[in-house]
Structures are given as structure tokens and as C-alpha cells.
Image (cartoon, helix red, strand yellow):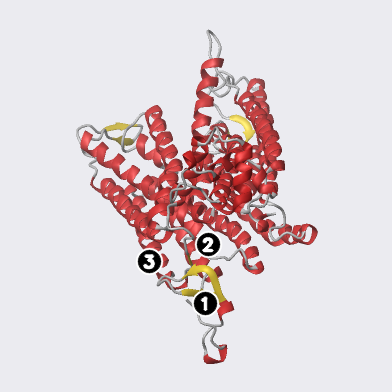
Amino acid sequence: MAMPISSAAGIPLLGNFIHGFVDFKGRPVTRRGSGGWKSAFFLIGVEMAERFAYFGISSNLIIYLTGPLGQSTATAAENVNAWSGTVSLLPLLGAFVADSFLGQYRTIIIASGIYILALGFLSLFAALYSYKSPDCQIVANLQTCSPSQFQSIFFFFSLYLFALAQGGHKPCLQAFGADQFDEKDPKECKDKSSFFNWWYFSTNLSIILSLFVLNYIQDNLSWALGFGIPCILMCLALIIFLLGTRTYRFCMPSDKRSPFVRIGLVFLNAARNWRTTPVAISKEEEALGIMHYQGSQQFKFLNKALVAPHDSKEDGQVCSITQIEEAKAVLRLAPIWTTCLGYAIVFSQVGTLFTKQGVTMDRSITSSLQIPAASLQSFSCLAVVVSISIYDRILVPIARSITRKSSGITMLQRIGTGMLLSFLSMVIAALVESQRLKIAAEHGLVDMPKATVPMSVWWLVPQYLICGISDVFVTVGLQEFFYDQVPIELKSLGLALYLSIFGIGSFLSSFLISVVEKATRGLGRDSWFSDNLNRAHIDYFYWLLAGISAAAFAAYLYFAKSYIYNRRNSL
């Protein structure tokens, strides 16, 4: 606790301390001596190392499964999809543990340790895995092996241990970084909005580097080295994180009870009091001196939690208005979360169908050099890097001068702009694919699936670029929105909810493809996803996705228009 001693004595005045924050020893912190960008730079550096490591494994995983491990393409794809979905949902577990028990700081340290252990196991597996096993075969000049049951168990144990570490690391680190900015201070409030932009900018730079460097090492030098470098980087990341400890701000919990328990009790009591009449609720509100305001008018059925079950006012049984408003804040997120799934389904196509299109097209750079189809994904990352710079340094200041808002435009306006752009990307993708099919037919290549269609692969660049630009608006907007709108002690869960949108979106995309595949396949008729892309109709699927995007965008506008922000500074 601080004492109001004169600054002439060299001790900060009481007003210089930040309410609700302490340092790593539990002492009050000053604005100048803690947090802000000085802490954020440590955490951004850690995130860059983590993203480099994560994409160093995930981006080339299917190649390792179908190559050295000798799995079929179908089996490898199933394994990758299952692992990717798990990766996107485990942050919910990590956030629960952090927000209820360990706190973000301890969770990050433990997750980093598990990360290093998992990457060490993967490196060890790749180094010791014998290519001279009697099960090895030479296929198309590539040596593939079928691992023993123990080897398979060890590999997938390491892989899912890696996913578990990512689930604890990903939501907590970004939430902890945003906590370094005090939203009650006008300058730091602006800095927090910029923090989300530069966080995503930095991670995309790291991803680009990982795609080029680690993929080359894994494909051409050594898988053990390709897995080992991320392990070394995560060791450095943990050291960097610990070095910044003295500068970090730590949020002080306002209630010793778990936030999940507090909010869960609201829904439980409201359900138990389902027969309570509005008159009884009004009397309870009057007795408690609760004033009506706009936010409380939503989900009024939760106000039944104000009344003690069975008229018993035992300690902990009656919910406060603060608890009820926290529950309402979480419930308000549901429509936004649901409508953004349409965007997540579109987002899933960048690394799959877009790449399959590129494989069939003319990828020549020179007479002897071709660009890999998968490398076109780097255009999305480049679009993110460039767009964030323009958005944060040019568009936001202009918008601030017009709207007088610290973030320029609201978070929901930002997300909506990105959803509109994703719709446009699907329209462009459908038109380009229609043209590709037309050219294939004109040149008699319909029944020649391995022939190169005389259409430059650069025609795909616009759809990649627009997807990247939409990502700047939607993904960064969702990060900031879900962080800002959840109760103060559920920040990690907020970011985990944002990540789960893309996990569920990936599963929905796979389900949609499966349904369309079965629905469009018939006797003597190729499906939309025929192995012969010149007979397939991916363009029809893109039009379907454009329709889904339009419907999701319309629903989003409806819910966003009526959404009530739970913080004044978010308006």
C-alpha cells in the first residue's frame, strides 16, 4: 500500500500508482516504472519465437507424415485435421486453468516448459528414427518407413504434448501483454489498440520467416534440425520472458472466488428461480438500490439470480449485480462468436483449395524455376504486414479525427469490414476458378489432370491479398473485442474464445466439404471436389462460401447493431 509522501523525498506520490495492479512481488506499481511498451516488447519477442516454432511444425507436418513416416495422403490429412482442431480448442482449457488457478504468468512459464519438452521429444524422434528399418521402401527416390507401434505412440504423444503447450501459451501471453496497458489512461488506451495491431504484425513477420527457413531446412537438410531449431528458440523465448519480469504489471483479482464459479452461480441461481415473478425481482432491485441502465435491460431473466433460492440468504447463495453483469457480458458475446464462424470457414480455404488451384496453373518464374503453389500463402502474410502498418499509422489517425474515438472505429465496425472483404475474396476466387476451367476446356485439358493449364498462377494473388487484408480487420478486431468485452479476470478465456472460432470453423469447413462431396457425386458425374480439378467445380463451392459469407455478414450486422459494449472506452 502506498503512502502520500512528497515526491521531493524521492518516493512517488499516491496518484502515480496504478489502481488494481501490482509488481511481481505484490507491491503497487507506478505508470512510469512498469508496463506499457517496455513490457510489451518482451512479450512480442516471446510471441514471435513461439509462432516461428509453431508454424515450423504445423506448416510442414503433412509432408513429414506422408514422407518419412510413410502415411497415405488421406490418413495424414485426417491426422493433421484432428491435431489442428485440437490445437484451436485447447486454449479454452489453458485459459480456464490460468483464470481460475495459476494466473497468466505461471501458466506461460509452465506452458513454455512443456513446449520445450515436446519440441525436444520431436527432435529426438526425428534424430533417432531409423531410416534403415526393414519396413523402409524407396518410392520415387524418397525413402519412407512404417514406424513401430511404440514409435508412432511416442511421436503422436510428443505432437499432442506440443498442442497442449500451445493451448496454455497462446491465450495467456497475449492477454498478459494487453494487461500491461491501463485502459483508464487515455494515452495507454490508445497504445493498447495499437498493441493488438503490432502484435499481429510481428507474428506474421515471424510466420513468413518460418515458412521460408524451416521448411527449406526440413525438406532439404534434416528433419531433426528442423525440429531442433524451434526447441532452441523456445528456450530463448522463456529466458526473454523471465528477463522482463521486473517490468510487468499483474492484475489484482477483485474477488477470491474463481470467475468461472461466480458466473456459473448466476446461471445456476437464475435457473433455480425460473418461477420467480418480475414483481419479486423488481422488489429485490429496489431493496438493493439498483438503478436501471441500458446494459441491464438485456437478458433480464438473469436478474432472477438476485433472489436467493428458496428465499434463503445464505452466504454465497445470492448473486450481486456485478456478478450478473459479468454473466450478461459473456452471454452477449455468443451471437458475435456464432456469426463469425462464417468468416472462419472461408479462412480455412487459404491453405487448402487455393493451393490445389495453384498446382494446376503455370507457376513458371523463369524457364527453369517454378514457384511452389504453397508459397503463395506468403502473399496473405505480406498483405497483413503492409496493411497493419497502413491501418495503424494512416487510417486510424484519420478515423480518430472524424469519430473522436481512441481506436478510430469501433471493434465491431472493424470486424464487419473484414467480413465484407472475405465475401469479396470468395467472389474473386470463384471468378478466377471459372476462368481456369474455361481455359482448360478450350485447350482440351479436361481429361488431363496432370497437365499445366496455360493460365498464370499470379491470377490467384488478388484473392490471397484480399484474404490477408480481411485478416487484419477481422482477426485483430476479434482479438481486441474478446479481450476487452469479457470480465476483467477472464481475459485469457476471452482470447481463447476468439481462437475457438477458427477451430470450430476448421471442423465446419471439413464437414461442409464432406457433405458437398457426397451430395454432388453421382453415377457418371464428377463431384465438385473431383481429383481431376479440370472436371471439378471448386468455383461452385466458392460461390456457396460467398453465399454463406453474405448470410453470416447480414446476421452479424443485425447483432452488432444492437450490441451493448460493457465498457465505456469501447464505444
What's under tag 2, amino acid-wise? Asp
Mark before the other along the chain sequence, 3 or 2: 2
Dot 2: element: loop
67 sits left or right of 490 in the view: left
Dot 3: element: helix
Q: Is residue 43 above or below residue 307?
A: below
Q: Nearer the viewer, mark 3 or mark 2?
A: 2
Seen at 70% across and 54% down, the residue is 571
According to the picture, the residue beneath numbered tag 3 turns out to be: 239
Q: Is residue 379 visible?
A: no
Tell me the number on the disc at residue 179. 2
Seen at 42% across and 65% down, the residue is 241
147 sits left or right of 378 in the view: left
According to the picture, the residue beneath numbered tag 1 turns out to be: 33
**Relative depth, front residue between 186 and 363:** 186
Q: Residues within 10 Å of mark 2 (few under 14, many from 20)?
A: many
